Amino acid sequence: MAAGRHGKRRKSQEPVQPSAPSPPLSLRHPAVLLLVAVVAAIVVLSVTFDTLDPDQWQHLAVGRFIWTQHRFPTIQLWTWPTYGQPDVDYAWGFEALAWPFWRYGGTIGLYLWRWLMTLAALGLAWAASRKMGARGIAPLLATVLCAMVYRGRTQVRPESIAAVLLAAEILVLEARRHGERVHPLWLVPIACLWANTHLSTYNFLFVLGIHAVDATLPGRPEHGASARTLWLTLLASAAVLLVNPFGWRTLGQPFHHFFALRHEPIFKNILELGPVQWNQNWRNGLPLLLVGWPALALARSRRRALDRVELATCAVFTASVLVGARFIGAYAVAALPYVGRDLDEWARRRSWPAWLRPAWSRSALAAAGCLLLAIPELTRPGIPIRMRLPWTTYTPVAACDYIASRGLRGRFFNPFPLGGYIAYRFAPDRDRLPFMSAHLEGTPELRGLYAFSLLDARGWGLLNDQYRFDVVLIPRYAYGTTPPDNLALTLDADSSWAKVFADDVAQILVRRDGPFGTLARDSSYAVLPGDPRNVPAIGAKAIGDLPLRRRLERELWREVAGSPWHSEALGQLANIAMLESRWDDGRRELTEALRVQPLALGAREKLGMIALAQGRPREALRWFEQERRALGYRNGLDLRRGQVAEAEGDLPRALAFYRAELRRDSGNEEARDSVESLAGRLGK
């Protein structure tokens, strides 16, 4: 018995041998096909969010011109100060291709463009990893990771075509490098198309140059005649890059930007031209990719010959990301083939449990991994998955309707994010063209004075003296310059201008002594300020001044009537209703504000405050939680949660929330008073 027990013990102590690595699955296997469908669905979902790039309207305006006039514009037709001057439109090919999607498909057409371009770019990059030998399912995990990183660059813009062309170039070169009989001259038409759709042709030359240098260096089977073929292809491609309507001037634009334009104040204030905002990119996996790609490449080099192409490609595209956030998209596409190949080799070296041997088990595990990679980014607050043109963001539809209906024309002023839509709406009417469009036209002196005018009243005075504007069209909210945009503040203090229109997107002002003086006299807003920073002061005065409150209310209802996009006015009307304890009115106005703008800041919080005032703390808590989920955490929400806890009689929990709020925002007087009051009652 002892021997038996000993024998059993010895048997139980024997190590369990893991099963041998499973062979790669065929792409035709149903489990793999289902996994590919899951990845494609994740990719499509990742780009199904608001189409909000203001540049797209200018691109669509040019595309419309090309299709209706049957030629591409070589002079400036989109802004009045520079009208008729020579122009270089590097993106004319993209604009001609994109216009039919909008013309015949509308909003769905724009989303169709985004879906097709993103699937094509990532699909070709995934195919390149398979040409490099990655026949397992691990590259699909890399595809999802790179899709999340690429997500922020998937608007309707020229770089979407450049991403497809970059992936196609890598596919051709890697297929050739890994033994397939693909002639590199296929790259010449890719170069020609690239030169007519996007200015990043330097990426094409970098990638082809890396392969040519690698083939030339000793230690590769490509050394010899194939290297000469690559160099000849590089020369032919460089020559064909000149086959565009603007010749060498198109190729010179990136260098002009790098050495000159990026130092101008106006360009320094554009976020995508600045460094990566890491607080906006940790959820999408960019830090993981930046660290993981070189780590996988170096680990692979310890087992195999050094892949000079991969290391050089990694170095070039990683350096570009560190230079500017706008290069993240190209980086993600360039990384995918190599990360997919390296991850596949790593996975094939592992010994996996026997239960992972069946194809369906492996695909199910990979699908779960894809979802885990995607969920943090797909659930990012403020970027819901939906198909919508956000008419409340830099698209002044109602303002342009007002301009057309009131016959406003002359010398317009506008910040450039609004200029693309104004050009789309009114070009080629020279009397209604924007001052500056999304392409930042003009001389360095004009752009410098424009930037100064946004920040300082003296700058606005100099610009207005020089151009003598008739109509000013500005955003409802400043668009995030550093230092902050102060033009609305300047115009509020300038009695020579009258605000005659406002909605969630834009405000229109006319000069009182100009051609629209009658409109200024009869239709100007007298109470409601243009700059949101002046609204709290008016609100504070209105608390104790009923006649002022009623005048303010009438102007807010006028704003509601003047535009379908009026959530801001409804929010302020709700504030007045809450001040006067008209809870049902406030709830109705806030509900309508959320219908107009589902991401209206503070609307759910105010609905919670109304529920709390009416004795429904559970409902109030649901509204506060919805505010956090929709827009992310912001100051004030812990204070509200504390008020719910206090209403339910849980005073210790309420005190904890109040203190948490005070730690986050030490200047919150309401939280401070609540802490002092409740701590005194609890003796804490």
Image (tube, rainbow, N blue to C red):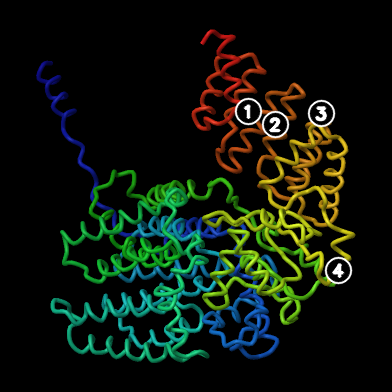
Q: Tell me the SS state at disc 1.
A: helix
Q: Amino acid at mark 2?
A: Gly
Q: Position of residue 216 (x, y in %)?
A: 19, 82
Q: Amino acid at mark 4?
A: Arg
Please say if the residues under marks 2 and 1 sit with CB atoms less than 8 Å apart: yes
Are there few (<14), some (14-19), or many (20+) residues within 10 Å of tag 1? many
Asked whether, in this view, residue 647 is left or right of residue 183, the answer is: right
Residue placed at 29% from the left, 58% from the top?
23
Q: Position of residue 659 (x, y in %)?
A: 52, 23
For the residues marked 2 and 4, what is the alpha-carbon distance in whole angstroms? 41 Å
Q: Closer to us: mark 4 or mark 1?
A: 4
Q: Closer to us: mark 2 or mark 4?
A: 4
Q: Tell me the SS state at disc 4.
A: helix
Q: Which residue is mark 2?
A: 608
Are there few (<14), some (14-19), or many (20+) residues within 10 Å of tag 3? some
Residue placed at 75% from the left, 21% from the top?
615
Q: Closer to us: mark 2 or mark 1?
A: 1
Above/below status of 523 relative to 676: below
Residue placed at 77% from the left, 51% from the top?
566
Q: Closer to the N terminus: mark 2 or mark 4?
A: 4
Above/below status of 292 relative to 395: above
> Can you say which quadrant of the picture contains the N terminus?
top left
Q: Which residue is mark 4?
A: 406
Q: Tell me the SS state at disc 3.
A: loop
Q: Amino acid at mark 3?
A: Ser
For the residues marked 4 and 1, what is the alpha-carbon distance in whole angstroms? 45 Å
Residue that protrudes farthest toward the left in the picture: 3
For the residues marked 4 and 3, what is the alpha-carbon distance in whole angstroms? 39 Å
Please say if the residues under marks 4 and 3 sit with CB atoms less than 8 Å apart: no
Q: Closer to us: mark 1 or mark 3?
A: 3
